[in-house]
Image (cartoon, rainbow, N blue to C red):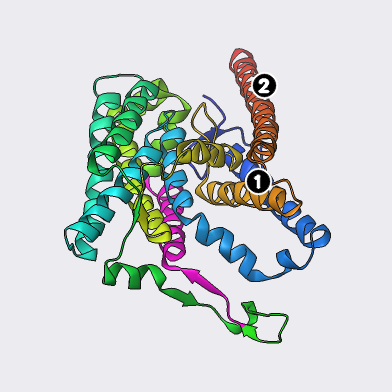
Amino acid sequence: MLNLMMTGNGRLKPPGRKMTDTNLLTTITIAVFFVMYIGSMVFLGEGFLKPQTMLNLISTNAYLIIIACGMSLVMITGGIDISVGGVTALVSMSCAVYLDMHGGNVYISMLLAIGIGLAFGIIQGFLIAYLQIQPFIVTLAGMFFARGMVTIVHTNPFNVANKDFVELKDTRIELPDFLGSTNRRGRFIPAKIEIGVIVALIIVAILFCVLKWTKLGRNFYAVGGNKQSALMLGINVKRTTFISYVMCGLLAGIGGYVYFMHVGSGSPSHATGAEMNAIASSIIGGTMLTGGVGNIVGTLFGVLSLALIQSIVSSIGLDQAWWTGITIASMLCIFLVVQSIIIARRKKANLKNAAGNAAKEVAT
């Protein structure tokens, strides 16, 4: 009988290991983020010392946090979804046209965004889970379809003038005074965040609980770790995979509306490259492309790390886009190497444990 224990995320591990791969990668991501941020405060001056700088990073990337969480779910199950950027753009344009040109209701526009996301999640999830079509091919088609539909809905960029929406967009949540700062004229500036930040943090908290403490979360990890083993444990692999894509589509719809609230406009060029940023954030956050390992908190810090890199590169005067790309690519390579080392260590530990158990069975 194998001498294994069940970890908090539903994976099996040898009893001698004190930290799971998921927790190790998450810890590394959080440590790297704080090292970068502290370094920024020390070497790049006053701007990074103000709490509002961090709050601005979160506000600007609240939509990316949401869609990256959805990306992490499908990556944990061993899949991928590259349509989320197109869905974000389609949600933004559709809601903009509905509100600005048809005098729509803000709450109905939210339902429209959720409906678009769910439609993509259900269709793509069915094709991938039940018809066994490769996730990359299905979601690539979804990305092209979404981008094409954006142009069909409306061809030109425009700002939304709907009064209720503008009021919602301009709403800010004021934080406690100790997070505020004083400008050069001695005037106190309170710290504020957009509504989208609250939405993003609530989603992170919910998904963290789902992955850590629910049967569905354990099934996600089991399916991503080994589909055959998951089947032997009685897990419905197809249904679990389908649910992961439906949740990813739902989060893409919600993230699309949060993005829409941030930019306040519709445009065919919106959210260009968002799917790549979501994948990069998930990887930096410790989610493995091979599946079975990942953490939503890690994804949150992966998004913040990506945003911080862009801010640092801009602050040191390297405004050209390629410097940001080079820096992100270097960081991705480092995290992929770390993941490769962890995978090799895990395989070695499993082989060693299996050999030890086999020796014990022979001895008895």
Residue at 59% over, 46% down: 302
Disc 2 is placed on an element classified as: helix
Q: Residues within 10 Å of mark 2 (few under 14, many from 20)?
A: few
- For this view, does 49 lie left or right of residue 21? right
Residue 50, horizontal then vertical, whole percent: 69, 70
Per the image, the residue denoted by label 2 is 348
Using the rendered view, name the quadrant where residue 182 is placed: bottom right
Residue 308 is inside the magenta segment:
no
Mark whose residue sits in front, 2 or 1? 1
User: In the current view of this chain or complex, which residue is farthest to the top?
Assistant: 362
Query: Which residues fall within the magenta stretch?
Result: 189-215
Q: Is residue 247 visible?
A: no
Residue at 38% over, 27% down: 230
Query: Which of 219 and 37 lies nearest the eye of the viewer?
Result: 37
Per the image, the residue denoted by label 1 is 29
Label 2 close to label 1 by CB (< 8 Å):
no
- For this view, does 42 lie left or right of residue 354? right
Q: Amino acid at mark 2?
A: Lys
Disc 1 is placed on an element classified as: helix
